[in-house]
Amino acid sequence: MLRLLLLFIPLLAGLAQAAPQSVLHRPIELDTGSGVLHGSLLLPKVEDAVPVALIIAGSGPTDRDGNNPMAGRNDSLKKLAEVLAQNGIASVRYDKRGIAASQEAGADERHLSIDLYARDAAAWGQRLKQDPRFSRLILIGHSEGALIASLAAEAAGADALVSIAGSARPIDQLLRDQLQSRLPPPLLTRSETILASLAEGRQVAEVPRELEVLFRPSVQPYLISLFRHDPAQAFGRLRIPALILQGSHDIQVSVADAEQLKAARPEARLDIIPGMNHMLRIVPMEMEQQLASYRDPHLPLARELGQRLLAFIQALPDSRNGERRR
C-alpha cells in the first residue's frame, strides 16, 4: 500500500477535544466475505434518526483515527468524528484492509487495490443505509480517502460526499511533483522511470533501496490500480451534493487541486480553510512545525473546518422523506 509520502521526506483556533457523555462509543465490524474490517461507531443518544458519516482514511498504513505508525499519533480523524458527534451526527471510521485491527483482511499487500478499498467503502455504506438509526449517509474522505469515497459513492447509496485534502491529479502526477524537489538527481531520474512503468501497468523488478518505501515490489500492484484512476474525473461523475475542503497550508495537496475538483463538478461547494494543513490543524508554512503536527494529538482541529463541515451536513435534505437531491 502506498506509504504516506511525507513520511519519506525526513529520510531523504480549536474545537472541543472529547465527545460528551451523550454519545455512545461502540466497536463495529463488517464481514466482507474475504475478511473482517474493524471500526468505531460514535452515535449521539437521541430518539430520532441522525445523519451518519463514513470517514475514510488516507494512504499508507493510516488507521481509523488518522494515525500512521511511521509518523506517530495525531488523532485527526478521531477528533473529526468527535466534532460530528458533539453536533448530533453519527460516524463510522474503520481500519482498511491490511491496517491495524483489519490487518488479517489484507495481510498480503500484493492483493490490495484501490478498487477493493472502494468496494469495502461501498459495503460499509450499504450497511449504514439499512440501519434505521440513521437518516442521511455522508462519505467523508481524507487525502487518498477522498478518491475512494468518490469511487464508492454510487454503490454505497451516499446522499452526499465531502472531500478533505483530496488530490485532483492522477496520483502518479502528484508523486512526481512531490518528489521533484526532494530527491537527488540520480534517484529522481530513477523514480521517473518507475512511475512511468507503473502508470503503463508494468511492474518494476529492481528498485533502489532508497525508494523501496514508495516502490517496493509488493506495493506495485496497488500503485498500478491507483494510477489508473483520475480523481477529478471520479469526482466529476458524482450526482449528489459535494463539499470540497482544503487547507491553504497543506504541504501535500494544493489549493489548485481543490480548484480542479471544483471545476470538474461546478455544483460542488469549495471552502479553503486559511492556515489549515494536511493534518487538519492550523500550522505555519514552516517544515519543522508541519512535521511536528503529524505526531501531536493535542493540537486542536481547525475551527473553521468543523464549522464548514457541519453547515454542509445540516443543510442536506432528509433523503428518507423523498426530498430531491441537488
Image (cartoon, grey):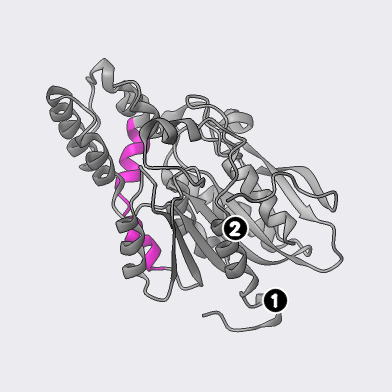
Residue 181, by quadrant, is top left
Query: For the residue marked with disc 1, what is the amino acid?
Result: Arg
Residue depicted at x 63% and y 59%: 126
Measuring from the top left, give residue 231's x and y in whole percent. Answer: 35, 56
Measuring from the top left, give residue 141's x and y in whole percent. Answer: 51, 52
Which of 167/156 is in front? 167
- Residue 298 marker: none
State if disc 1 and disc 2 touch (CB < 8 Å): no
Residue underneath mark 1: 320
Query: For the residue marked with disc 2, what is the amino acid?
Result: Gly
Distance between mark 2 and mark 1 Cα atoms:
25 Å
Residue 47 against residue 4 in the figure, above or below: below
Does the segment drawn in magenta span residue 236?
yes
The secondary structure type at the circle numbered 1 is helix
Measuring from the top left, give residue 157's x and y in whole percent. Answer: 58, 66
Residue underneath mark 2: 306
Residue 233, visible in the rendered structure:
no
Residue 64, by quadrant, is top right
Q: Residues within 10 Å of mark 2 (few under 14, many from 20)?
A: some
